[in-house]
């Protein structure tokens, strides 16, 4: 789906500021964006559109960098979004920390 990401990031895409409604993005520097990496990637996975995906590819090390960040998301993803990232980034459920946390929570609640 994102085969053209290297060409698209040359156009300097930006994450839609409305996606980060609870963050004052006007004063963020590169270090701030790096500290917020998992938060921003999670928001894009859950709510972003195609241009937001290209923006995080530019911010966080391309396709592979975003793939690694997705694996580290701790908040449970909506099943539709989990399926999407697994398909696009060729991930197994077990690769995702959020899946493992959900599985452990279900085991705990059902015991």
Image (cartoon, rainbow, N blue to C red):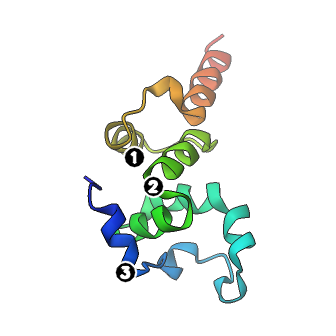
Q: Position of residue 82 (x, y in %)?
A: 42, 40
User: Residue at the spot x=40%, y=67% of the render?
Assistant: 54
Find residue 28 and report its image quarter.
Answer: bottom right
At numbered mark 1, what does the secondary structure look like: helix, strand or loop? Answer: helix
Label located before the other in sequence (2 or 1): 2
Query: Residue tagged by mark 1?
Result: 81
At numbered mark 2, what does the secondary structure look like: helix, strand or loop? Answer: helix
Are circles 1 and 3 on residues that touch, CB within 8 Å? no
User: Is 103 rendered above or below residue 67?
Assistant: above
Find residue 46 and report its image quarter.
Answer: bottom left
Residue count near mark 3 (Cα–Cα under 10 Å), binned few <14, some 14–19, many ≥20: few
User: Is 98 rendered above or below residue 37?
Assistant: above
Q: Nearer the viewer, residue 62 or 66?
A: 62
Quarter of the image where the C terminus is located: top right
Find residue 59 and report its image quarter.
Answer: bottom right
Residue 105 left/right relative to 80: right
Are circles 2 and 1 on residues that touch, CB within 8 Å? yes
Say which mark, if any, is on residue 11.
Answer: 3
Q: CA distance from mark 2 to mark 1?
A: 7 Å
Residue count near mark 2 (Cα–Cα under 10 Å), binned few <14, some 14–19, many ≥20: some
Say which mark, if any, is on residue 45.
Answer: 2
Q: Position of residue 74 (x, y in %)?
A: 64, 42
Q: CA distance from mark 3 to mark 2?
A: 21 Å
Label located before the other in sequence (3 or 2): 3
Residue count near mark 1 (Cα–Cα under 10 Å), binned few <14, some 14–19, many ≥20: some
User: Residue at the spot x=31%, y=69% of the render?
Assistant: 7
């Amino acid at each position: 789906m994102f085969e053209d990401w290297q060409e698209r990031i040359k156009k300097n895409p930006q994450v839609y500021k409305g996606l980060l409604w609870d963050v004052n993005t006007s004063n963020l520097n590169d270090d701030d964006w790096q500290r917020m990496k998992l938060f921003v990637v999670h928001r894009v996975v859950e709510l972003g559109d195609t241009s937001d995906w290209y923006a995080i590819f530019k911010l966080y090390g391309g396709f592979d960098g975003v793939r690694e960040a997705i694996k580290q998301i701790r908040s449970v993803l909506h099943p539709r979004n989990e399926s999407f990232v697994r398909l696009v980034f060729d991930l197994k459920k077990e690769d995702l920390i959020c899946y493992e946390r959900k599985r452990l929570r279900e085991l705990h609640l059902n015991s």
